[in-house]
Image (cartoon, rainbow, N blue to C red):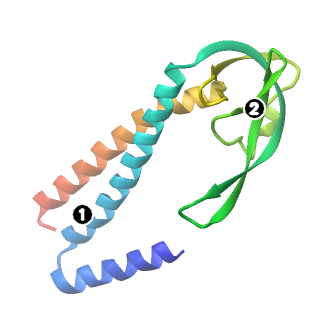
Amino acid sequence: MEFVIIYIVIAVILCMLTRRLFFLIFAVLSVFMLIVLAMNVYFCYMTIGLLMSKRRKGSFVRVENENENAALLGKNISYKVAVYDIDGVEYKSVFPAEGAFNVYFYSTKKRCSLWLNKKRGRVFDMYNVVSCIVWPLFSSMSCVGMGFIIVFARRMGL
């Protein structure tokens, strides 16, 4: 919430100082592009971890809470993570579990393909693999689209 208020104050100051809409569009889209590019770097890092993983057969066991200390925020963050069993050893998923569709995504009745990363002690399930492949593609396309909007706004003389 504070981020939105700070952003609105910056937008108002830019409008008062420059009186041009282009600088406001440029500032907003630049911040969005930086956020998307940072997430793109993260997902590329996770894709490298996926490429170093070995494919194994396993089964879903449960969804449990994971507590992690966020050093930047100065507080503990709790999220749900899927736990899988591969040859009698339980491994947690790399990404947090889906919140809304647990019944559809996680089934204890069937074995599934998992990608085990021994170095991290975590697994990639099929949904993690799709995320690692699809996200960098869509984020790159959205950054290119935002760049076109900036160029178009500049040429229109906004």
Which quadrant of the view contains residue 121?
top right
Q: Residue furthest front?
A: 119
Q: Residues within 10 Å of mark 1 (few under 14, many from 20)?
A: some
Q: Which residue is mark 2?
A: 105
Work out whether residue 71 or residue 34 is closer to the camera in this orientation and state it. Answer: 71
Q: Horizontally, is 43 left or right of 120 in the view?
A: left
The answer to whether the residues at label 2 and label 1 have Cβ atoms under 8 Å apart is no
Helix, strand or loop at mark 2: helix
How far across and how far down the image is residue 98, in percent?
Answer: 71, 42
Amino acid type, callout 1: Phe
How far across and how far down the image is residue 22, in percent?
Answer: 19, 68
Q: Horizontally, is 28 left or right of 23 in the view?
A: right
- Residue at (48% x, 28% y) in the render: 47
Q: Is 129 drawn above or below residue 9 in the view shown?
A: above
How far across and how far down the image is residue 99, in percent?
Answer: 74, 46
Q: Which residue is mark 1?
A: 26
Quadrant where the C terminus is found in the figure: bottom left
Marks counted in the figure total 2
Helix, strand or loop at mark 1: helix
Work out whether residue 152 or residue 144 is closer to the camera in this orientation and state it. Answer: 144
